[in-house]
Image (tube, rainbow, N blue to C red):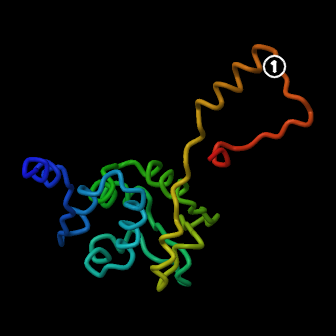
Amino acid sequence: MAANENKFHASQKHTVLCFCSLNEMAKKTKGSSARFVEILWSMVNNEDEIKKCGEYISWNESGTGIVIESPNELASHVLPTYFNTRVFSSFHRQLTNYGFKKLQDVERDEFVNENFIRGFPELRKNIIKKKPPDKHIKGIVGIAATAGFQAPEEAQFYSPATWI
């Protein structure tokens, strides 16, 4: 029985808490669905991070969105440190994947999300990354269409999210 106990303990995963910089957190938490949002939040709220990147990215005047004064400067000076990219369009894509909307402003880029508001950190949990479309389902529909399949008029179609 002792051998089974040892196997059980050896297979358990342990959580390790560490206190590290935002830069280290970005590298250690790859794959986390909220990693992008957490880093972005820290960039505009954490005093140390504001000193590093505040001239490139900050809250708008009302605290309802973020302002990027110079996308090219942000891409070359800030993004490589936090997001492992030098391409602003990749950062912009991530923002839109997390539900941020770009406001039309000639002088600067401004992005808003109803759950990313200065002074309300608890709202961040509502920001969820959009899922890519299910390519498998599209393939099935395409095969059915090329085979001449037609669904009856009364047929109801459901998204994959409702199949569960």
Q: How many numbered badges does the structure rendering display?
A: 1
Instruction: Please state if 53 lies on the left or on the right of 12 as rendered.
Output: right
Instruction: Please state if 136 lies on the left or on the right of 11 as rendered.
Output: right
In this view of the protein, which residue sits in the foreground, 17 or 46?
A: 17
Give x and y (percent) for residue 105: 62, 66
Give x and y (percent) for residue 91: 44, 54
Specify the farthest residue to the front. 1
Residue 151 in which image quadrant: top right
For the point 13% across and 48% down, which residue is it?
Answer: 4
Residue 19 in which image quadrant: bottom left
Residue 152 in which image quadrant: top right
Specify the farthest residue to the top. 147
Is 143 placed above or below 39 here? above
Specify the farthest residue to the left. 2
In this view of the protein, which residue sits in the foreground, 49 or 140?
A: 140
Q: Disc 1 marks which residue?
A: 149
For the point 69% across and 44% down, which residue is it?
Answer: 159
In this view of the protein, which residue sits in the foreground, 72 or 117?
A: 117
For the point 41% across and 61% down, which residue is it?
Answer: 34
The amino acid at mark 1 is: Phe
Mark 1: few/some/many CA within 10 Å (<14, 14-19, 20+):
few
Secondary structure beneath dot 1 equals loop
Is 145 placed above or below 68 here? above
In this view of the protein, which residue sits in the foreground, 27 or 148?
A: 148
Instruction: Please state if 149 lies on the left or on the right of 11 as rendered.
Output: right
Instruction: Please state if 2 lies on the left or on the right of 84 as rendered.
Output: left
Give x and y (percent) for residue 86: 34, 49
Give x and y (percent) for residue 47: 29, 82
For the point 65% across and 30% down, which residue is it?
Answer: 138
